Amino acid sequence: MPELSQETERGRAVAPFGLAEVTGPSMVPTLLHGDRLLVQYGASVRPGDVVVLRHPFQQDLLVVKRAVARREGGWWVLGDNPYAGGDSTDYGVVPDELVLGKARLRYRPFPAGQRSPLALVRWALSAARPLLPDRSASRRLRAR
């Protein structure tokens, strides 16, 4: 689940992009705890996209999930980690007005304490990645 700073939340009306930090294991292996996301607010959502949304029961809490299917009343969203929970299997369909935007890019900060040249090269090759839609999301939904 990401946390957005108050500046990002207020600045959303001015800029269509914002930053979020991922906390928790619900999107592992796609997103890890501590990853940063570039979020495009108001972007159209399609099945397979990673989205930022307000939790249906705690609207001050923002979460990151994968939009799996369009349903009557909104989106069915799931985490990539089936053991973490906290998705539509717990709270049902998420209304459209609670889906804030689509995550476009994942950035992993350089790990503290890593100083070797090999660690720097590994980080540089994997630090920033676009978040592409997972077209297998609907198959995962049918498997549940």
Image (cartoon, rainbow, N blue to C red):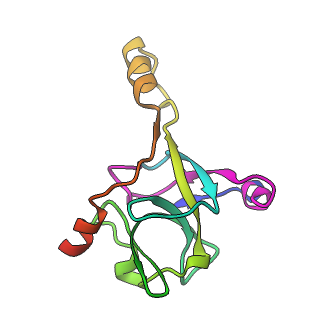
Image vertical order of residue 56 relative to residue 66, above or below: below
Residue 28: image location, x then y, percent? 34, 53
> x and y percent of residue 71 in the render?
41, 82
4, above or below 84, in the image: above
Residue found 45% across the figure and 37% down from its top: 129
Residue at 46% x, 41% y is: 130
Location of residue 116 (image quadrant): top left
Q: Position of residue 96 (x, y in %)?
A: 56, 77
Residue 32 covered by magenta stretch: no
Query: Would you identify the image quadrant in which residue 61 lies?
Result: bottom right
On screen, residue 41 versus residue 128, left or right, reads right
Q: Nearer the viewer, residue 67 or 89?
A: 67
Residue 14 part of the magenta-drawn span: yes
Name the one closer to the observer, 51 or 110: 51
Seen at 46% across and 17% down, the residue is 115
Q: Find the residue positioned furthest to the left.
A: 143
Q: Position of residue 55 (x, y in %)?
A: 54, 76
What are the residue bounds of the magenta stretch?
8-31
Q: Is residue 144 visible?
A: no
Q: Is residue 110 above or below residue 41?
A: above
